[in-house]
Image: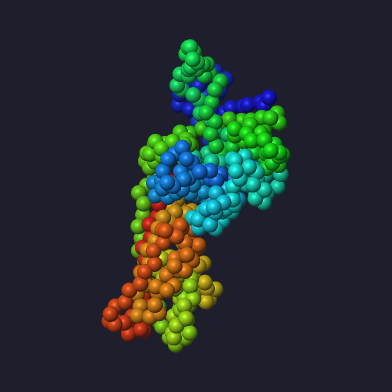
Amino acid sequence: MATVKSHFCTAQKLSSDIPACNPAMDVAFLSQTFIQPRMQVAVIIVAAGQGQRAGGAIPKQRRDLAGKPVFRWSIDACLEHASVTHCVLLAPEHEIDLYRHESPHSVRVVPGGATRTESVRVGLQACDIEADDIVMIHDAARPGLTSDMLSQLINAMSDADAAAPALIIADALKRQSVSSIEDVDRSDLYRVQTPQVFRHGAIERALDGEQSYVDDLAAIEAQGGTIKLIAGSELLAKITYPEDHARLETLLMPTLPAPRFGTGYDVHALEPGDQVTLCGVSIPHTQSLVGHSDADVAWHALTDAILGAAALGDIGDHFPPSDPQWKGADSAVFLKHAVDIVRAKGWALASCDLTIICEAPKVKPHREAMRSRTAEITGLPIGAVSVKATTTEGLGFTGRREGIAAQASAVLAPTKQSD
């Protein structure tokens, strides 16, 4: 039988075997980390189920929750944590391309198995870490993951073989049979949540074989390991039934600031040439765009829109045209930088809209490729990327085919509370 430890901090009166919260001690506890400089932390996010009990035509892990898919909440929390070095997403095999489009490039998306335990085994194999490194296994249907919770779980592994968040049961419990209803003692019962945390080698050995488990802690319990429970959170409640989605949205929305909106505009002159680059797509043409970098006027406008929404200046502040290192640079570098820097500030790009203003070349034949390439670099689902074009009816510098202009808008969704 496994040994179970607990460290709970709650405003409610606790049972006698669980220590009360001491804020000063908790700050010290969280500030100390046992992870060595080269220790790696991987997070496996399980999203391969169908979520049928939650109802709806779209699986629960892909439904929109306060501006982004449910599974992206957990991904974003992991990517903004300094200690997390790897993130693996287990997705349904028939939707693997869709999940890859909707996930950042740094996330490894692999097909899950027929059961949750099989999916976890696949995820463990996909983690390129050592046996003594830390692996966290998390359900995508628990979107309320926070950076603070990740830190607490990492620290909890200093004196345990596994750790998990758990909640004390506050309600009275009853057991009903055919003939009677009887009380159930709840004093030593807990609601265990995810992420559940392990040494990579230990959980891989524990799950070796064909057996399925109710959760991943059960595999360590079967090995006689030491398990530590820390204070869980109602934000980590699981979306299982239709009413759960609305409840989680209500819980999560008050913790976040309002979305941000930004616009960008850019112009590049044309000169004799054989192609132009728009949204990362090379288009054959009788002219080329002039610029210090690759002169991708559309992505330059979008980069400005993203930076502007987060009040982080413009593209020239981050990539001065006077700097020779950006001569001929791929504008994907600029766009990805904008996405990454706003994420570090607590924002995620939620959608974008680009309008390209020119008489030629024709944009429509290349529009889907441009949307796809933009989605790939930004990590957006393709449905959140709009690309369109217009002319000025022969008027102005674009009408005279002296240059191409582009304007863009970007919506940023908050991923954490404001500083």
Camera sees residue 290: no
The residue at 53%/41% (across/down) is 139
Which corner quadrant of the image does residue 269 belong to? bottom left
Label count reads: 0
Task: Locate residue 197: give its quadrant.
Answer: top right
Residue at the image position 48 percent from the left and 71 percent from the top: 280
Most distant residue in the bottom direction: 272
As drawn, is 187 to the left or to the right of 223?
Answer: left
Q: Is residue 141 above or below residue 291?
A: above
Against 45, residue 314 (above or below) is below
Residue found at x 48% / y 17%: 176
| Nearer to us in this view, 106 or 341 | 106
Residue 208: x and y, percent? 71, 39
Quadrant of the image for the N terminus? top right
Q: Nearer the viewer, residue 402 or 148?
A: 402
Measured as percent of width and height from the top left, residue 331 is found at 49, 70
Q: Is residue 378 visible?
A: yes
Across and down, in percent, residue 95 comes to 52, 53
The extreme front residue here reads 178
Image position of 195 (left or right of 342): right
For residue 228, which quarter of the picture?
Answer: top right
